[in-house]
Image: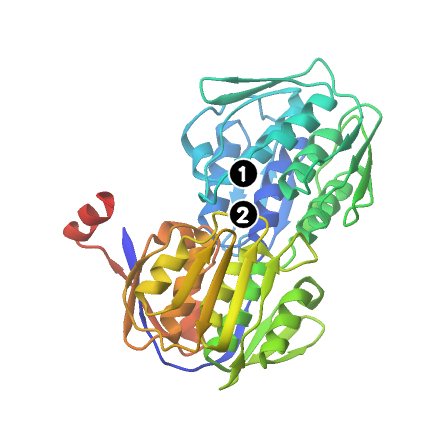
Amino acid sequence: MEKLKIAGGYPLKGTVRISGAKNSAVALIPATILAESPVTIEGLPDISDVEILKDLLEEIGGKVELSDDFAMTVDPSAMISMPLPNGKVKKLRASYYLMGAMLGRFKKAVIGLPGGCHLGPRPIDQHIKGFEALGARITNEQGAIYLRADELRGARIYLDVVSVGATINIMLAAVRAKGRTIIENAAKEPEIIDVATLLTNMGARIKGAGTDVIRIDGVDQLHGCQHTIIPDRIEAGTYMILGAAVGEGVLIDNVIPLHLESLIAKLREMGVQVETGDDQIYVSGSRELKAVDIKTLVYPGFPTDLQQPFTSLLTKAAGSSVVTDTIYGARFKHIDELRRMNANIKVEGRSAIINGPVQLQGAKVKASDLRAGAALVIAGLIAEGVTEVTGLEHIDRGYSNLVEKLNGLGATIWREALTKEEVEQLENT
């Protein structure tokens, strides 16, 4: 077990290259189950979720090779529908994509209830509604979801709430169903288009990905292909926020600016200099930042995954800012930790009210989830003195080579092993 130590107050400058999208990777890798021959996905991020999914595919009989540059080749030809009720499945939320993929290929699956970050209730009822509409029988037995179908048939499915996970999962199950499936009120995130592109390259027939109505005509089988993952817009957004907070000119490379328009607009509203190119974004901070209000919304609105990092930036803004999370109401566990660092923030219902500017102070803080971890790293870079961040297992799930990338920009940040006493203290909190 390790902690992250950050010496704050150093201005950042230079170029950082963005890795492949975590939220795509965790769906693209399970999607390879649907093919009958090898699939190669290039540009995957170097994160723990990718390693866990590799192990899970190997558990069900897949032959998986992961190269040094994080290209993964999956040979799914010998895979079987082996139950995955426990173990690694519980380590990541996106293990639920195994349900759609295994149901699509084998017409049955047994998957343990997924784990991941604790952000309040994130039910999979829309996923189950979709699977049942396609003809699956679903039961919850001893903490695992059992999915069984004699055959899958296309259906018209209306999602009661816009859900990225449900949209992708239904898409995975439907590509090998008989007949046409129509998903209405579908999510429009770039990661959905990425998964649809992979499936289309494998021989699936999908139209409308990226709109709120997706049409899928089922096919009997899918074949292998080669696919390059899109850049991670949330990692890119995190570095943009960091550049706004402590940057003297940070160039974010390998990014799709269109995916970040809501963040770009808010940074400019605060007085941050943001310039966009074809696949690059340049951000330079300002001495005087203005308070702004943000409300998280489904894409193309402001991403809930950037709400927590943005809150750290708002501690530098003059005036009162309000951050409202309409997606995950419980996504404010980082606020108490920011208060330890001298932030002036209070939470009222689904909103956090940030009064600034204040000078953050280094402190010992703990990441409760992935994006809370990013918020605390940004706060540590802003703060006077040294900040210690524990809970690095959360950060490692979504940020590839974070320490190396930040040090490359001029930060002073390093990892240290926890002492025996610190480990005991953490286990007791």
Give the residue displayed 73% in from the left and 40% down from the top. 199
The residue that disc 2 covers is 328
Give the residue pinned by disc 1. 122
Q: Evaluate whether residue 196 shows in this view.
A: yes
Total marks in image: 2
Q: Nearer the viewer, residue 294 or 372?
A: 294
Q: Residue furthest front?
A: 348
Residue 392 locus on image (x, y percent): 36, 54
Quadrant position of residue 133: top right
Q: Amino acid at mark 2?
A: Tyr
Q: Inspect this view and state whether residue 77 appears.
A: no
Element type at mark 1: loop
Q: Residue at left 53%, top 43%?
A: 65
Residue 10 picture quarter:
bottom left
Near-viewer residue (361 or 295):
295
Task: Determine contact: label 1, label 2, CB under 8 Å.
Answer: yes
Residue located at (29% from left, 71% from top): 362
Query: Residue 238 appears at what percent x and percent y?
Result: 52, 65
Q: Residue at x 72, y 35 (%)?
A: 159
Picture layout, residue 151 above or below residue 33? above
Q: Name the outermost residue toward the top.
A: 150
Q: Give the colour scheme shown.
A: rainbow
> Counting residues from the N terminus, which is met first, the one under dot 1 or under dot 2?
1
**Disc marking residue 9:** none
Left or right, 427 with reference to 191: left
Q: Position of residue 178 (x, y in %)?
A: 81, 23
